[in-house]
Image (cartoon, rainbow, N blue to C red):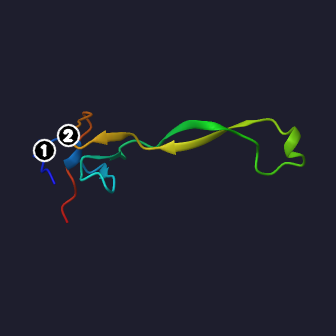
């Protein structure tokens, strides 16, 4: 496994950044801001009287932004000491 030396003020050392499992601490999610809603498709509502006549509605999920460990957004904050 390759080891990467990170700068002091980068996503990998930020309190808001959480590493994605299986990414060897190279990619993760920034939790500084709330998740961003995104339309991922269209579908019929789950509860309707007649699903065949129901209009299609957007399917919306929320996601935290993906960041690399060496990224930097300008909102860096040190991790809490354990």
Earlier in the chain: of badge 1 and badge 2, it is 1
Horizontal side of 56 relative to 81 (left or right) equals right
Horizontal side of 41 relative to 43 (left or right) equals left
Q: Which residue is drawn at 21% across and 54% down?
A: 79
Q: Which residue is drawn at 26% across and 51% down?
A: 15
54 up-or-down from 18: above or below: above
Residue receiving disc 1? 6
Dividing the image into 4 quarters, which one contains the C terminus?
A: bottom left
- Measured in 3D between alpha carbons, the distance from the residue under mark 1 to the one under mark 2, in whole angstroms, is 6 Å
Q: Position of residue 60 (x, y in %)?
A: 60, 41
Q: Which residue is drawn at 76% across and 45% down?
A: 45
State which quadrant residue 34 falls in: top left
Q: Most extreme residue toward the front, as rendered?
A: 1
Horizontal side of 61 relative to 70 (left or right) equals right
Numbered tag placed on residue 70 in the rendering:
2
Q: Which residue is drawn at 31% across and 40% down?
A: 67
Numbered tag placed on residue 44 in the rendering:
none
- Callout 2 crowding tier (Cα within 10 Å): few <14, some 14–19, many ≥20: some
Q: Most extreme residue toward the top, as rendered?
A: 74
Task: Specify whether residue 58 is in view.
Answer: yes
Label 1 sits on a secondary structure element that is: loop
Label 2 sits on a secondary structure element that is: loop
State which quadrant residue 74 falls in: top left
């Amino acid at each position: 496994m390759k080891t990467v030396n990170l700068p002091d003020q980068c996503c990998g050392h930020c309190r808001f950044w959480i590493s994605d499992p299986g990414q060897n601490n190279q990619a993760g999610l920034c939790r500084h801001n709330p998740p961003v809603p995104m339309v991922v498709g269209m579908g019929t509502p789950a509860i309707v009287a007649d699903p065949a006549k129901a209009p299609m509605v957007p399917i919306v999920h929320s996601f935290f932004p993906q960041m690399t460990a060496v990224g930097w957004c300008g909102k860096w904050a040190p991790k809490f000491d354990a």
